[in-house]
Image (tube, helix red, strand yellow):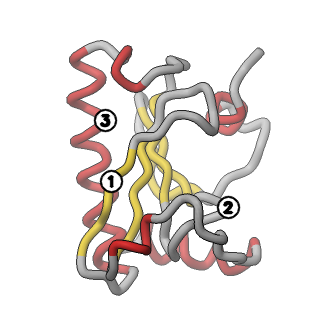
Amino acid sequence: MASIFTRIIQGEIPCHKIAENDRFIAFLDITPVAKGHTLVVPKVEVDHFFDLDNELLAEINLFAKEVSKKLQRTVPCRRIGVAIIGLEVPHAHVHLVPLNTMSDINFSAERLKMSSEELAALATEIRNA
């Protein structure tokens, strides 16, 4: 069965897309830990992040770097935090989280509640950065 991320990649489920190329997609997390929380996902469905082949592993980091620059230009923050957890969805992915404090990347904390309209406007702003 396809992961929710594969279904997003295939267009079956909508997302607030930030960036995309032939190998990766980046979109806003709909239950963010901080405003601008973005997921970077390879289009190939691999469960464990470190099972990605070396070329893809290098490329996802370079793709995430470009996305993080757009995030930092758009969302006021001191830096962009990076997390690889992999327990929520069985599809390798990277979390990019705008940070001002250490607690901004606490995945156990209550998630922000943002409307679809707020997420869409933010995604547009980040894409255009």
- The residue carrying mark 2 is 30
- The residue carrying mark 1 is 82
SS at badge 3: helix
Whole-percent x, y for residue 25 in the image: 48, 42
Task: Determine which of the numbered discs, if any, sits on residue 60 in the image.
Answer: 3
Quick one: label 2, few (<14), some, or many (20+) residues within 10 Å?
A: some
State the residue at coordinates (41%, 43%).
94
Of the residues tagged 1 and 3, which is closer to the observer? 1
47 left or right of 13? left
Quick one: label 3, few (<14), some, or many (20+) residues within 10 Å?
A: some
Give the amino acid at mark 1: Val
Measure the C-alpha gap from mark 3 to mark 2.
21 Å
Give the amino acid at mark 2: Ile
12 vs 87, nearest the viewer = 87
Give the image quarter of residue 127: bottom left
Labels 1 and 2 touching (C-beta < 8 A): no
Measure the C-alpha gap from mark 1 to mark 3.
12 Å
SS at badge 2: loop
Earlier along the polypeptide chain: callout 1 or callout 3?
Answer: 3
Looking at this view, name the residue that lies furthest to the bottom.
Answer: 76
11 left or right of 21? right
SS at badge 1: strand
Give the amino acid at mark 3: Ile
| Quadrant holding the C terminus | bottom left
